[in-house]
Image (spheres, helix red, strand yellow):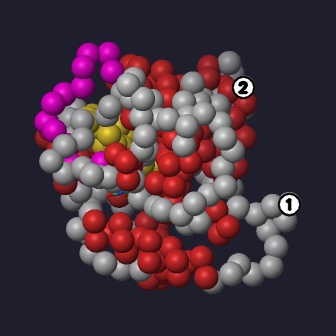
Amino acid sequence: MTLLDTIDRDEAGTPGDDGLRDLIFARYRQSVQAGNAEVNAVLETILAHRSVRDYLPAPLPPGTLETIVAAAQSAPTSSNLQAWSVVAVEDPARRARLSAVSGNQRQILQAPLFLVWLADLSRLRAVAGGLGKTSDGLDYIETFLLSVIDATLAAQNAVVALESLGLGSCYIGGIRNQPQAVAAELGLPAEAIAVFGLTVGYPDPARPADIKPRLSQEVVLHRETYGESRPAAPLGLYDTILRGFQAEQKLPAIDWTEQASARIGTSEALKGRHALTETIRALGFALK
Ligand SMILES: Cc1cc2nc3c(=O)[nH]c(=O)nc-3n(C[C@H](O)[C@H](O)[C@H](O)COP(=O)(O)O)c2cc1C
């Protein structure tokens, strides 16, 4: 039983009057002063997000990949440049090799589909070249960043879409551990790099993931200006709330403040990604 199971629903399964407040409560495990808008399917899908790391072997119905990609391509994109691509990998042997270079993450083997999202400037380089024009603007870190932003917005649209279809997913930042190996495996052109992977499949109901609480809004939401130093109290409260989630999910007990500090504590904790600037250049990006 999860917090969401306690939400009042009508016969059609739509949350009742307090539905939005309940959904938001489930995200924070604290009350948040929210407006009194009615819940709709989009809000319900977004607020109920959770990463899924246990999948059924069932494949996706035909056409699902194309639906997901249409949702991804519906995301805004800087100057309509559409500077991203995605590689859909189903072949178990290829998924196994990609898992091996992404920190041996089991969910890549288990999920029937692995989407590799690319920051991709190769197409724009070719477009300009085809017109006999220069493309010097691609050489700057600004344009690299633009392509990463484009890929990220597209992928998150895909996540919302696939969750609305009853599918689950998990981003895989581990794909950046060895970008050159990934580029070789996927046959990427110069100026294309995998920025994250995404496992996709039907969640295993025997090992359900729950909604992971987030930092309280008073920690992340600033009004007008960023303001003075942030209060320590909400972080202590978040440690406690997250400990509760960890206990329910049978995850190792660790304060968020400890976990976050360990993740950023040393270059070794970046698992090879500390050398990313050189690697990105080696893949053809100038990064001026
Ligand atoms: C860019 C990105 C990379 C991630 N990489 C991994 C990963 O390699 N392995 C993993 O298990 N989860 C990964 N995650 C999932 C996060 O751990 C997860 O989103 C976070 O803990 C919050 O949990 P939730 O998504 O269930 O709300 C990644 C998430 C993002 C956004």
Q: Does 51 appear in magenta? A: yes
Of the two numbered discs 1 and 2 on the same chain, state the one appearing first in sequence: 2
Classify residue 271 as left or right of residue 213.
left
| Residue in front for this viewpoint, 130 or 88 | 88
Where does residue 18 sit, x and y in percent of width and height?
54, 43
Marks 1 and 2 close (CB-CB < 8 Å) = no
**Residue 182 versus residue 16 in the image, above or below:** below
Real-space CA distance between mark 1 and mark 2, rounded to the nearest whole angstrom:
43 Å
Where does residue 218 sit, x and y in percent of width and height?
67, 67
**Residue 10 versus residue 258 in the image, above or below:** above
Residue identifier under label 2:
133
| Residue in front for this viewpoint, 24 or 60 | 24
| Residue in front for this viewpoint, 160 or 10 | 10
Three-letter code for the amino acid on which mark 2 is drawn: Lys
Q: Secondary structure at mark 1?
A: loop
Residue identifier under label 1:
224
Disc nearest the viewer among 1 and 2: 1
Q: Is residue 1 visible?
A: yes
Classify residue 109 as left or right of residue 125.
left
Q: Secondary structure at mark 2?
A: loop
